């Protein structure tokens, strides 16, 4: 499989083939998601919570996002790469938004950016699209403005708010977005919006009627300890197996059973003899050497 392009994503929408998107925040995460065959990797600002331990996404900075983007870019060979613009990197001024979007491409190794908001973001979306940077929208539950929304709540639940979201989606498409994330909205609303738009919608808590789906890496693998949103399906719960493995390491180190000879380096016998004469005082009896070192001294057949 070659590198996923914008054209591939659009073709998938037109063919009714669901687009797969996952977040990743570092090199191993990106390698795993890429190997799993996801179409899009989003370096989401959710990393503020899942990786950096903040209570919300608003504190993450441009520099932190770019740092993680670079690691993800190094670990990705196939998936299309989208960098999430952090809170206040695009809201204050259009020119600043364009410059920051450009940094995701030039410094972060991303191929596109994502930002949150509807009609109020049209000028920003237009400006970013105009300089040739592919841009993804994000409507519904927008985590950067949860204070205003009254918390992590389902959005577009009334006829009025659903209509507003539907209009916002059309405006974002018209402004130049190549796709729109729909988060935590009723499934029938997401389906109608998806049918109305030409560009793909990527749902998270928006039902099966979207053109694609996205989930957060740590949610899918059971690696976030604070809460599991209703729309998350945990495909594995890796927390306890990881703790168990790390406990085993600590226990073996404590018991002196790790490292063994298999994890240690050997030394040529003659060199070892010379070394002993040079640095080990006579009163330093070999029995005081660690078990592993002594077993190495006895074998001393293979060089490092
Ligand atoms: O930051 C993020 O991970 C996101 C996804 C939930 C879409 O925006």
Image: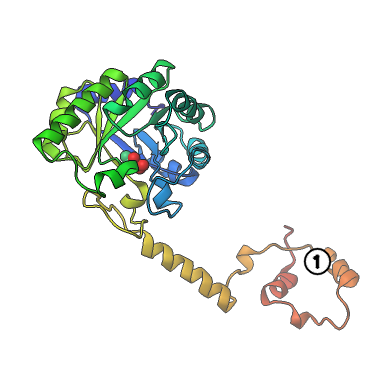
Q: Quadrant of residue 85?
A: top left
Where is residue 72? Give x, y as percent.
47, 39
Q: Is residue 75 left or right of residue 175?
A: right
| Picture quadrant of ligand 1 | top left
Residue ID at (75%, 82%)? 287
Number of callouts: 1
Query: Residue farthest to the right?
Result: 278
Q: Nearer the viewer, residue 101 or 208?
A: 101
Identify the colour scheme used. Answer: rainbow
Question: Furthest residue to the top?
Answer: 130
Q: Is residue 11 visible?
A: no
Q: Tell me which residue sits at (17%, 30%) in the image.
A: 164
The residue labelled by disc 1 is 269
Judge whether 190 appears above or below 184 on screen.
above
Instruction: Pinpoint residue 38: horizontal percent, then vertical percent.
Output: 34, 37
Say which quadrant the C terminus sits in.
bottom right
Q: Is residue 200 above or below residue 264?
A: above
Q: Residue at x 25, y 27 (%)?
A: 200
Locate residue 197: give its quadrant: top left
Image quadrant assignment for residue 131: top left
The image shows residue 58 at horizontal and vertical percentages of 40, 45
Q: Secondary structure at mark 1?
A: helix
Q: What x and y, as percent, mark residue 290?
A: 70, 76
Above or below, comparing residue 165 to residue 281 in the picture: above
Quadrant of image for the N terminus: top left
Q: Nearer the viewer, residue 26 or 4?
A: 26
Residue at x-position 41% and y-position 21%: 128
| Residue 71 visible somewhere in the drawing | yes
Q: Indicate whether 280 appears above or below 132.
A: below
Q: Does the closest atom of ligand 1 sit within 8 Å of the Cβ of label 1?
A: no
- Classify mark 1: residues with Cα within 10 Å, few (<14), some (14-19) or many (20+): some
């Amino acid at each position: 499989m070659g590198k996923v392009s914008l054209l591939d994503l659009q073709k998938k929408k037109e063919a009714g083939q669901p687009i797969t998107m996952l977040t990743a925040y570092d090199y191993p995460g990106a390698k795993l998601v890429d190997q799993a065959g996801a179409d899009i990797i989003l370096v989401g600002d959710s990393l503020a919570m899942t990786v950096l331990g903040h209570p919300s996404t608003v504190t993450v900075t441009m520099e932190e996002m770019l740092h993680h983007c670079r690691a993800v870019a190094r670990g990705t060979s196939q998936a299309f790469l989208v960098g999430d613009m952090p809170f206040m990197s695009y809201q204050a001024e259009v020119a600043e938004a364009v410059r920051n979007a450009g940094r995701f491409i030039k410094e972060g190794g991303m191929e596109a950016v994502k930002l949150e908001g509807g009609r109020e973001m049209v000028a920003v979306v237009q400006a970013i699209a105009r300089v040739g940077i592919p841009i993804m929208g994000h409507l519904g539950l927008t985590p950067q403005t949860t204070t205003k929304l009254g918390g992590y709540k389902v959005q577009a639940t009334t006829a009025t708010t659903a209509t507003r979201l539907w209009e916002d989606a059309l405006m974002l498409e018209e402004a130049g977005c190549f796709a729109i994330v729909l988060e935590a909205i009723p499934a029938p609303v997401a389906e109608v919006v998806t049918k109305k738009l030409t560009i793909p919608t990527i749902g998270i808590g928006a039902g099966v009627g979207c053109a694609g789906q996205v989930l957060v890496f740590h949610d899918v693998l059971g690696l976030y300890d604070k809460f599991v949103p209703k729309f998350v399906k945990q495909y594995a719960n890796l927390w306890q197996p990881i703790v168990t493995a790390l406990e085993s390491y600590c226990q073996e180190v404590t018991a002196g059973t790790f490292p063994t000879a298999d994890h240690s380096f050997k030394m040529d016998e003659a060199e070892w003899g010379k070394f002993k004469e040079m640095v080990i005082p006579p009163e330093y009896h070999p029995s005081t050497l660690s078990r592993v070192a002594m077993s190495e001294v006895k074998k001393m057949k293979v060089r490092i």
